[in-house]
């Protein structure tokens, strides 16, 4: 099933001054259950593409379809709701709320979804257990290692039961052991739960694990191969 489809995605920053063409006519299809890495040098456009697919940014030209829903036709408020319910995000800098515990960080999006407290508590516990840090559930981010914080971020990304997870340089701040552990967790979720992951990365360790590698240079797809 086609989960993500982009047609002619073009993104131009500063169009009225000195235009910067971040993306130039990107056509892409990602199916449910893929474990895909989007790679390329810094400034190639891979993070911009991820942000547009995730509805965090809007393209200048082109369309993005998520399960057939055209994001370009959604109002800002409807796009926020769509992101909240359909897309999970994992960021390079973790982006955890510093005053929240691990459990509160994971459960926060479910509060926004107005889920019952009992349901939130059960899912938070199960998610933290699935990423191997249930014993850290009452700790705040500054009491955890980078690897532990990123595991919390993965659990948070899954909390809303999204259709797919977008991971932007998720291993950039992790050591080798933490990277291996994190990728093991993600790959296990991909295999056992058919969770779709799309990475933006230049980390060879992520690229080696990916089942499909899409290379972007100067805002264009120059290679698309199965690993």
Image: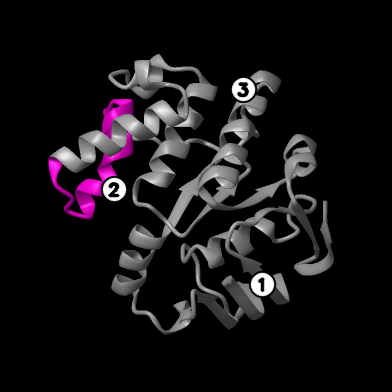
* Left-right relation of 202 to 199: right
Which range is magenta?
98-117
Furthest residue in direction front, as rendered: 192
Query: How dense is the environment of label 1, judged by Cα within 10 Å: few (below 14), some, or many (20 and up)?
Result: few
Q: CA distance from mark 1 to mark 3?
A: 30 Å
Q: CA distance from mark 3 to mark 2?
A: 25 Å
Identify the residue under disc 3.
178
Q: Height in image: 191 above or below 222?
A: above
Specify whether residue 108 is painted magenta: yes
Depth check: 15 or 49 in front? 49
Q: Earlier in the sequence, mark 3 or mark 2?
A: 2
Q: Height in image: 62 above or below 107?
A: below
Given contact means CB atoms under 8 Å apart, are the residues at marks 2 and 1 in contact?
Answer: no
Identify the residue under disc 2.
109
Query: How dense is the environment of label 3, judged by Cα within 10 Å: few (below 14), some, or many (20 and up)?
Result: some
Q: Residue at x 75, y 38 (%)?
A: 203
Q: Position of residue 104 (x, y in %)?
A: 26, 33
């Amino acid at each position: 099933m086609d989960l993500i489809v982009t047609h002619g995605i073009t993104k131009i920053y500063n169009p009225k001054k000195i235009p910067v063409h971040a993306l130039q006519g990107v056509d892409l299809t990602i199916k449910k259950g893929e474990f895909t890495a989007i790679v390329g040098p810094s400034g190639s456009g891979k993070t911009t593409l991820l942000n547009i697919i995730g509805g965090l940014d809007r393209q200048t030209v082109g369309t993005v379809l998520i399960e057939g829903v055209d994001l370009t036709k959604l109002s800002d408020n409807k796009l926020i709701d769509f992101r909240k319910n359909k897309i999970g995000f994992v960021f390079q800098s973790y982006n955890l709320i510093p005053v929240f515990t691990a459990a509160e960080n994971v459960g926060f999006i479910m509060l926004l979804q107005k889920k019952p407290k009992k349901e939130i508590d059960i899912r938070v516990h199960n998610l933290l257990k699935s990423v191997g840090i249930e014993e850290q559930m009452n700790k705040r981010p500054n009491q955890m290692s980078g690897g532990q914080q990123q595991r919390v971020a993965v659990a948070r990304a899954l909390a809303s039961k999204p259709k797919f997870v977008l991971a932007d340089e998720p291993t950039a701040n992790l050591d080798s052991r933490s990277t291996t552990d994190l990728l093991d967790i993600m790959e296990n979720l991909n295999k056992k739960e058919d969770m779709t992951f799309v990475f933006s990365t230049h980390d060879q360790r992520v690229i080696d694990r990916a089942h499909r590698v899409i290379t972007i240079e100067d805002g264009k797809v120059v290679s698309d191969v199965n690993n």
